[in-house]
Image (cartoon, rainbow, N blue to C red):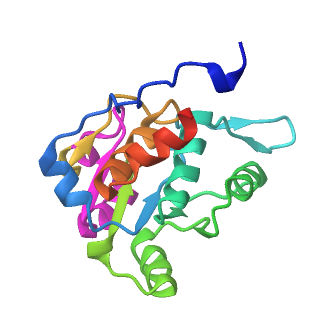
Amino acid sequence: MSQSNATPLPPLQPALQFDPQLLLLAQPVRVAFFDVDGVLTDGGLYFSEVGETLKRFHTLDGHGIKLLQQAGITPAVVTGRDSPALRLRLKALGVMHARFGTEDKRPAAESILAELCLSWPQAAAIGDDWPDLPVMRRVAFACAPAQAHIEARALAHHVTAAPGGAGAAREFCDLLLVASGRYAGLLAAHAA
């Protein structure tokens, strides 16, 4: 049977649901800040015999970051560490705004906001530990992975079901996409 004679598929209805109050908080978001260790990775640090740091990234998280870009939300990374593996991953994802090796994340995030001509009420952040708190406290929408330190979870508007490095960043991205009104359209385009 040719594709032209096939019965049309019914429209795909999104299965994903979030609390409407969370979506209202996230509606103005135009930039999403990501920590790396414990958010985009599982938080484990792997060192080779020559001292190179190895990192494991999840494809679900990477696709979520690409979807944010398609929806007009800029992904940005602010991290206390730096490594060739991280830079390679961010380049592959097309992440243009990143600050590496910074222990004081607030000024780093502020410099990215200035570059984008945006402000804290247009930002969201996902972080898992104390160094992330200054950024999480200032954004319109704060998120923490399931395994995050208790203080990060207490500050977050939303704690993901998935842990860092295993889909937490994707859940954060999905929530922002739903809040932006772009989730259903992106899903339909991918499922066509």
Left or right? Give the position of 43 relative to 51: left
Looking at the image, which is closer to me, 75 or 45?
A: 75
Q: Which residues are magenta?
A: 130-153
Q: Residue at x 68, y 60 (%)?
A: 94
Looking at the image, which is closer to me, 128 or 9?
A: 9
Q: Residue at x 60, y 19 (%)?
A: 6
Q: Does any portion of residue 75 appear in the rendered image?
A: yes
Look at the image and say whether residue 131 sits in the magenta stretch. yes
In the image, residue 27 lies at what x, y percent?
A: 26, 62
- Give the total number of marks visible in the rendering: 0
Q: Quadrant of the C terminus?
A: top right
Q: Is residue 135 above or below residue 171?
A: below
Left or right? Give the position of 25 relative to 57: left
Q: Residue at x 43, y 47 (%)?
A: 185
Q: Is residue 190 above or below residue 121?
A: above
In which image quadrant can residue 117 be found?
bottom left
In the image, residue 161 lies at what x, y percent?
A: 32, 29
Q: Residue at x 28, y 67 (%)?
A: 139
In which image quadrant can residue 16 be found?
top left
Q: Does any portion of residue 41 appear in the rendered image?
A: no
In the image, residue 148 lies at what x, y percent?
A: 35, 39
Look at the image and say whether residue 137 sits in the magenta stretch. yes
Q: Which residue appears farthest toward the front when viewing the image? A: 5
Q: Quadrant of the N terminus?
A: top right
In the image, residue 153 lies at what x, y percent?
A: 25, 43
Looking at the image, which is closer to me, 176 or 188?
A: 188
Left or right? Give the position of 17 relative to 192: left
